Image (tube, helix red, strand yellow):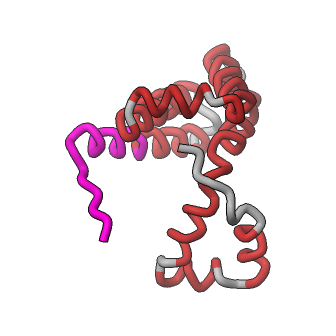
Amino acid sequence: MVSFEMNDRKKIGLGLTGFGIFFSFLGVIFFFDKGLLAMGNILFVSGVSLTIGLKSTMQFFMKRSNFKGTVSFGIGFLILIMGWPILGMIVESYGFLILFSGFWPTLSVFLQKIPVLGWIVQQPYIRSLFDRYRGRRVPV
């Protein structure tokens, strides 16, 4: 059995990532409030950096296959800061999907183990969506 040790840095990183997602969600709920969205982005990226380490973060974002996603995410953040939150979030979302599309197989396995959600994910239509990305490696 594999044991995952959580040191304090990783715990703080997961907390920051969670707060980043929460602030981004609040920013969208409050009609694309650019302050909340910017705070969510900063917390999310810093949380990921603390969770997987600075070197792994740099390798992930600077990988040749992730270049388009990194540039889109960065340009979307700049557009958001300049005052166009809806356009910025659209560009950021595109970059986010490109960057983290390799995590679908891991997410699929995780969702199948959750009691009620697992049953929903096992339905043929939804399963076909997840099976489309099965077999790809996780990018980190």
Q: Where is residue 60 in the image (x, y as percent from the top left)?
A: 56, 34
Q: In this view, does 124 lie to the left or right of 47?
A: right
Residue at the (42%, 41%) spot, across then down: 17
Q: How many marks?
A: 0
Asked if 51 appears above or below 42 in the picture, the reply is below
* Quarter of the N terminus within the rendering: bottom left
Residue name at image x 65 percent, y 51 percent: 102
- Residue at 70% in and 24% down: 71
Q: Position of residue 69 (x, y in %)?
A: 70, 33
Q: Can residue 89 be seen in this view?
A: no
Q: Which picture quadrant has residue 27?
A: top right
Q: Give the range drawn in magenta.
A: 1-18
Q: Is residue 48 above or below residue 58?
A: below
Q: Which residue lies furthest to the top in this view?
A: 82
**Residue 77 quadrant:** top right
In the rendered image, which quarter is residue 97 located in?
top right
87 vs 102, nearest the viewer = 102
Q: Is residue 122 above or below residue 106?
A: below
Judge whether residue 13 is colored magenta: yes
Left or right of residue 25: residue 135:
right
Across and down, in percent, residue 53 comes to: 38, 33
From the image, give the main secondary structure of the stretch colored magenta: helix
Task: Residue 59: tell me if it is visible.
Answer: yes
As drawn, 117 above or below 135: below
User: Which residue is at 77% across, 66% downward?
Assistant: 132
Image position, residue 4 (x, y; %):
29, 57
* Magenta stretch contains residue 73: no
